[in-house]
Amino acid sequence: MIPIKTILHATDFSEHSSYAFQFACALARDYGAKLVLLHVYPTPVVPTLSGAAIPLTMDVPREELLEMLNEIKADDPAIVIERVLAVGEPAFEIRRMADAYHADLIVMGTHGRGGLSRFVMGSVAEDVCRNANCPVLTVRTNVGVIRAEKNEAAQREPAAMV
C-alpha cells in the first residue's frame, strides 16, 4: 500500500469541489492522513507588451474566505483538517502548497470543461495534473450518488430479454 500521510484538497467552493472533498475525507480517514484544505483567491493580472503579467493589487476578503473554509466540515470528526488561504494564480499556488506541506496526494474537483470553453477559461486541474510533484485525483461529479441511483433503478425495473 502506498503511504499517504498528507492530502491536499484544493477548493473553489463549487459543487465539484464538494464532491472532491468527500473523496479527500474518505481517503484521509482510510489512510489516517492529515487533510490540508486550501482555497486560492485568484489575483487578476494585466498582460504587458513584453508578454509578462503584472498582478493587480487588490483587497482580499480574508475573513469571509476563512469563514467559508471553516464551514467545510468532515463527517468524521477524527479527520485532522488544516485550513489554508492563499492568494495568487490558483494552479501555481496549489502546486506550491502541495510542496510546502509535503502532500502525498492532491484531490480536487474539475468542472470538466472542454473545447473552446477550456481554451478561454483555462484549466487549473489540468495544469496541476501536468506539473504537480505528487499524484493528483480529480473528481468531476458525485460518483457514489450516481452509482447508487443507477443501482436502485436497475433493481426496480427488470431487464428486458432480447
Image (tube, grey):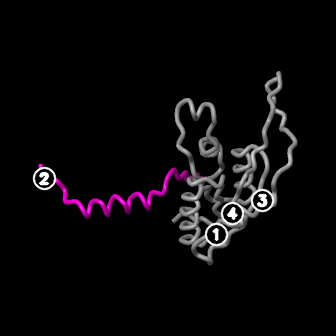
Q: Hey, what amino acid is under mark 2?
A: Met
User: Number of marks in the image?
Assistant: 4
Would you name the residue on which mark 3 appears? 64
Q: Hey, what amino acid is under mark 4?
A: Val
> Foreground: 15 or 21?
15
**Label disc, if present, on residue 36 of the rendered structure:** 4
Q: Residues within 10 Å of mark 3 (few under 14, many from 20)?
A: few
Q: Where is residue 124 in the image (x, y as percent from the top left)?
A: 64, 43
Q: Distance between the residues labelled 3 and 1?
A: 16 Å
**Magenta segment range?**
135-162
The residue lying at 57 percent from left, 73 percent from top is 75
Q: Distance between the residues labelled 3 and 4?
A: 19 Å
Question: Tags 3 and 1 in contact by the CB under 8 Å rule?
Answer: no
Q: Distance between the residues labelled 1 and 4?
A: 12 Å
Secondary structure of residue under mark 2: loop
Secondary structure of residue under mark 4: strand
Q: Which of the marked residues, 3 or 4, is nearer the chain's N terminus?
A: 4
Secondary structure of residue under mark 3: helix
Q: How crowded is mark 2: few (under 14 residues within 10 Å), some or many (20 or more)?
A: few
Q: Hey, what amino acid is under mark 1?
A: Lys
Answer with left or right where residue 127 lies relative to residue 151: right
Q: How far apart are marks 2 and 1 (CA)?
A: 47 Å
Residue 40 vertical placement versus 145 (above, below): above
Q: Position of residue 143 (x, y in %)?
A: 45, 57
Residue 50 vertical placement versus 127 (above, below): above
The residue lying at 53 percent from left, 71 percent from top is 30
Q: Where is residue 112 in the image (x, y as percent from the top left)?
A: 53, 43
